[in-house]
Amino acid sequence: MTPGTHPSIPKPTFEGDFQLDEVVSLESGEVLCRPTQHYAMYGQLNEARDNAVLVCHALSGSALVAEWWPQLFAPGGLLDLKRDCVIGINIFGSCYGSTGPGSIDPQTGNKYGPTFPLINVRDIVRAQAKLIDSLGIRKLKLAIGASIGGMQVLEWAILFPECVARAISIGVAPLGAMGLGLNHLQRQAIQLDPKWKGGHYAPEDAPRGGLALARALGVISYKSVELFEQRFNRKPNRNGENPWISTAAGQNGRFDVAGFLDYQGEKFNARFDPNSYISITRTMDIFDPVRAHTSPYAAYERIQAHLTLVGISTDWLFPPEDIRSLAAIIGAAGVRCDYREMASLHGHDAFLAEPEQLVRLLTPVFE
Amino acid sequence: MTPGTHPSIPKPTFEGDFQLDEVVSLESGEVLCRPTQHYAMYGQLNEARDNAVLVCHALSGSALVAEWWPQLFAPGGLLDLKRDCVIGINIFGSCYGSTGPGSIDPQTGNKYGPTFPLINVRDIVRAQAKLIDSLGIRKLKLAIGASIGGMQVLEWAILFPECVARAISIGVAPLGAMGLGLNHLQRQAIQLDPKWKGGHYAPEDAPRGGLALARALGVISYKSVELFEQRFNRKPNRNGENPWISTAAGQNGRFDVAGFLDYQGEKFNARFDPNSYISITRTMDIFDPVRAHTSPYAAYERIQAHLTLVGISTDWLFPPEDIRSLAAIIGAAGVRCDYREMASLHGHDAFLAEPEQLVRLLTPVFE
């Protein structure tokens, strides 16, 4: 690529840990003992500390926002590091630096593994608010995120209404039955692997077959029938395998889509932990911003931020009509809430697959 | 149920095996040595032997048509045993009586297991034609089937054009990329199970966890987002489990949809063989009635039957628009081919879940 045609990915101005020096009570009734949040900052906080943008990551993301969403930093993009200070915080349960199943439980001295407590999006957001507060930030200029990142944005706007000026939540509503079912089967795939061992596997001998299958199933739910049809159709695998003949021991040739799914599973395996996958999909399952409020109205009327919800036309994990309805319900509670829709074949994944379109869609909203 | 309000399920007038006394060459280049077809007949062949209706079964079906499609035999239904002789033939690869992975390979004296050859729908139909011929039937009054049963119907109409008067193929076109991907992941689930053992498992120690997961994933693909939403929504599992709290060793409570999927997997396990599941999903994958013909036109112009294709409005495994297009392509080859659509929330499964609607849709066509 010619230098200059592609914006270089910005480096964080800070990357480090924020440790909560306390026992954190969780929504599930359990506790996290002195948990750590790994976070990164890009650009500088201004003197008034009113230029902070919180970017909340999705299942497989991390605090290093610019590594997975670089297009938002491109010239003419949503974020401008001359103006904004962008903050990314790794969520509890993840394997990218914050406390998760791979961490040591200070109460026992042992790794949490499968005993890592159930984390609610609300738990994540409360801990993030402490971190943000410790930086002297009273109000976020913007909180933005997609998928489980968008869940965090909604909880921020409800739990800390005075602390969020603008909020953009992409591709998210409480998960419907189909999504709950798919997440359940993904966890079962991991637990079916002979290396699962009840979750007490060694990192170098993890249930990688199960995680690969879970991820492949995830990829199916993140993409659309239309995209798969356009991209793969009934083509045989590009490496020359032939699905129409038998080979030894039932290893028949694959179609191209199968080769793609296997590849996605393998690629993910190199960078993710099975217990974290289980933990975060559970967090996604139980997200419900209305729960524990007396009514949807009571939850949503708290919001002071100008909120934008974005649906994706071919998303069947979080159908756009669910997000449109959610925007209407929130609007009916007196909140300034608008709905925008990405027209994309990429399904749920569009926020990562077509970020330029997302930027075009959001820039006028943001300005 | 009050006697009289529900039609009793008819019993077959004949159930037995038809053995091909020869080595059968398969489309894959392999052979099946003296394979058996298990079949059932309901009602009687008339003297002219022109009242035969072939009902082709789907993945988990059997020759015993009335057990899985009883509504077709109900008064006012499609089939009338006073008039028709209904024939069901178990397909190769199945575990319900015909030669499949659980059979002994006469060439080796050992069970086929995972070495069972790849079966093409065309192989199945050629063998069925020999059985039908042996009964002295020159022309089927009707061939009808759904899913892989509908694939058989289409191949019948193309391969043996003079032998089929009426053909009804339901919920089927060549599988698209999403369906191919889902079938692939289902096979991987079985093969991930520690009891898989390369397919050489003992029947009493089969990879049941893998088959249950495969079936649950299948069920997801057979049903629709809308149905799941209506039926399960975000309800917790009906047995009282609580998804919002942690329990020991990561065994969190399930949502209702997860309980349903697990139950479907277990129920299927009691009656199906993992190697058969792998074999039949492969057969489904490679179905392509045009392949090995010089063009789609050349394949379809062979058809002499009056053909009806049925799509299901919410089927995302075999989208109705694919089936509608197929009907148009076949029609353009000069075939009398009409398209009808079931309006159902049940997705692909509608042919089993709402058979009464199917009967209403088809009765005028048939008469």
Image (cartoon, coloured by chain):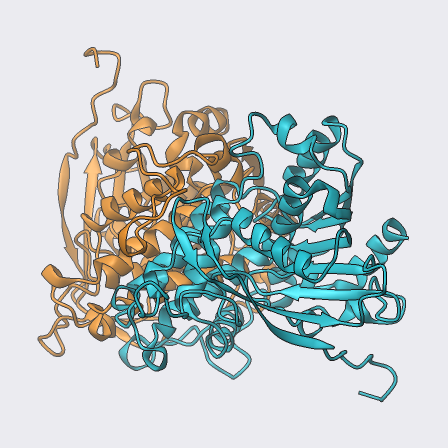
Chain colours: A orange, B cyan
Task: Identify the image quadrant of residue A241.
Answer: top left
Q: Pick the residue in front: B181 or B167.
A: B167
Q: Is residue B91 left or right of residue A133?
A: right
The x and y percentages for residue A9 are 21, 27
Residue at left offset 27%, top offset 52%: A248
Residue at left offset 55%, top offset 54%: B124
Q: Pick the residue in front: B102 or A74.
A: B102
Is residue A2 something that shows in the picture?
A: yes
As drawn, A286 above or below B300: below
Q: Residue furthest front?
A: B21
The x and y percentages for residue B359 are 82, 60
Is residue A184 something that shows in the picture?
A: no
The x and y percentages for residue B32 are 43, 57
Q: Count the marks.
A: 0
The quadrant of the rendering that contains the N terminus of chain B is bottom right
As drawn, A58 above or below A113: above
Task: Identify the image quadrant of residue A143.
Answer: top left
As drawn, A315 above or below B359: above
The x and y percentages for residue A89 are 25, 48
Residue at left offset 19%, top offset 67%: A195
Q: Pick the residue in front: B182 or A315.
A: B182
Q: Residue furthest bottom?
A: B2
Q: Is residue A219 left or right of residue B55?
A: left
